[in-house]
Image: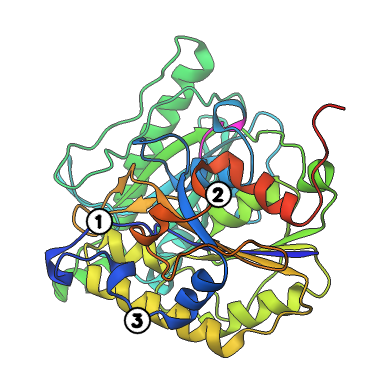
């Protein structure tokens, strides 16, 4: 039995005036996904707990069946693994944003969604700083404004974020959250790095050009999510499956990679709204021929919501639906498909919220309920009911006849 999980990042949303009181999922023309819902069953899922907004890191951990309270050590290590950096024992990793600051105020946390091409060139210039106070520094670009920072040496993950997580807020210089020497040293190294990075970025020709064009300059790096690599039991150990992930973003590759999933690359998978949906979806069905479980991650829904653009989110959902219809090619009839999200992202506030996300399960041996459409409202009456994120993998693996009996 094969399993395909299609994860639409930040797919859940709230009703919008711009969409006449509908959510993007309700407003979107998605006949293929609605057809799967009508032929399968739906429900709602709290990625972690009702009313608690989660990050994509903790949301993905939970959906894969790993308790974030037990296994989450910070976002940084997953980003580093997904970026191809093999962390050593004691390494501390951070997720970073290229951002726009004025004085000590964060004007734009994503530097106007700077392109991957410009961001990569900026990060390349910063990566020439390889050591601060005896601590080795590794900096690597991933997608758009995103990058990964790794500190190697006598360092600690007990330091606070520099990212205030909102525009117009004051820049947060990293502080030690423990009074040991390593934590104090790490905070000082980060402050020196941020200062040096800003000096380099302010003088870079790309930022000079962006200033001339009236675009936000990328003149600061904001580290957050400090952590050391956790140890997770693999999906092969837990369920006996050979699993793969197809994604454009480093975080998703990293979380899935830490669970023992193999990263399969798809041409044109950018982790942005301009990703090649046909390539990713067709690659997912091809990969199912040799893997038991394939996890397909699509980011653009979340991006549109963070940009407070519900119409673009709905339009992108329509693009996903069309690409699924064009490339639907199951390797056999013994396939279970799950479509869901890792969290709700409000296209009104541009933030993650704690609303449950819709879940759709269709395929071989799946019961059929009365649902006719895939969205947040119709899913509320589906046969799946309202589950936790950590329940999902057990449900899917049970449908694949891979779970073990509890008790005699």
Which numbered disc covers residue 386?
A: none
Callout 1 secondary element: loop
- Examine the rendering and report whether any part of residue 151 can be seen: yes
State the image quarter where residue 31 is shown.
bottom left
Q: Which residue is mark 3?
A: 29
Callout 3 secondary element: loop
Q: Residue at x 26, y 66 (%)?
A: 207
CA–CA distance between discs 2 and 3? Answer: 34 Å
> Principal SS element in the magenta part?
loop
Judged by depth in the image, the label closer to the viewer, 2 or 3, is: 3
Q: State which tag comes first along the sequence, 2 or 3.
A: 3
Q: Residue at x 47, y 37 (%)?
A: 48
Q: Residue at x 39, y 53 (%)?
A: 380
Residue interval drawn in magenta: 71-75
Q: Is residue 1 above or below residue 33?
A: above
Which numbered disc covers residue 14?
A: 1
The reply, left or right, for residue 136 in relation to residue 194 is right
Judged by depth in the image, the label closer to the viewer, 1 or 2, is: 1
């Amino acid at each position: 039995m094969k399993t395909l999980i299609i994860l639409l990042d930040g797919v859940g949303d709230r009703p919008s005036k711009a969409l006449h009181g509908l959510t993007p999922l309700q407003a979107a023309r998605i006949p293929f996904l609605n057809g799967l819902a009508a032929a399968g069953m739906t429900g709602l899922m709290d990625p972690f707990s009702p009313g608690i907004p989660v990050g994509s890191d903790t949301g993905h951990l939970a959906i894969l069946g790993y308790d974030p309270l037990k296994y989450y050590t910070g976002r940084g290590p997953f980003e580093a693994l997904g970026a191809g950096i093999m962390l050593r024992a004691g390494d501390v990793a951070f997720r970073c944003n290229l951002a726009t600051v004025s004085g000590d105020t964060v004007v734009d946390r994503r530097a106007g969604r700077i392109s991957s091409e410009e961001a990569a060139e900026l990060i390349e210039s910063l990566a020439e700083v390889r050591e601060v106070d005896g601590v080795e520094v590794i900096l690597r670009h991933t997608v758009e404004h995103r990058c990964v920072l790794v500190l190697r040496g006598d360092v600690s993950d007990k330091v606070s974020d520099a990212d205030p997580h909102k525009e117009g807020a004051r820049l947060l210089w990293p502080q030690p959250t423990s009074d040991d020497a390593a934590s104090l040293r790490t905070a000082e190294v980060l402050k020196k790095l941020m200062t040096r990075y800003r000096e380099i970025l302010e003088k870079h020709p790309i930022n000079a050009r962006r200033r001339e064009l009236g675009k936000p300059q990328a003149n600061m790096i904001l580290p957050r999510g400090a952590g050391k690599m956790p140890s997770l039991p693999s999906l092969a150990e837990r369920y006996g499956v050979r699993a793969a992930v197809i994604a454009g973003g480093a975080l998703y590759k990293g979380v899935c990679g830490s669970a023992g999933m193999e990263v399969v690359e798809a041409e044109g998978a950018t982790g942005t709204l301009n990703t090649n949906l046909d390539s990713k979806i067709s690659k997912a069905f091809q990969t199912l021929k040799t893997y038991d479980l394939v996890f397909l991650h699509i980011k653009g829904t979340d991006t549109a919501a963070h940009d407070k653009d519900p119409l673009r989110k709905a339009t992108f959902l329509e693009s996903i639906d069309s690409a699924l219809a064009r490339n639907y090619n199951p390797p056999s009839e013994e396939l279970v498909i799950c479509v869901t999200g890792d969290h709700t992202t409000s296209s009104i506030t541009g933030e993650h919220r704690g609303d449950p996300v819709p879940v759709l399960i269709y395929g071989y041996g799946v019961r059929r309920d009365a649902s006719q459409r895939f969205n947040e409202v119709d899913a509320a009456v589906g046969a799946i009911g309202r589950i936790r994120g950590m329940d999902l993998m057990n449900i899917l693996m049970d449908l694949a006849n891979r779970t073990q009996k509890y008790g005699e």
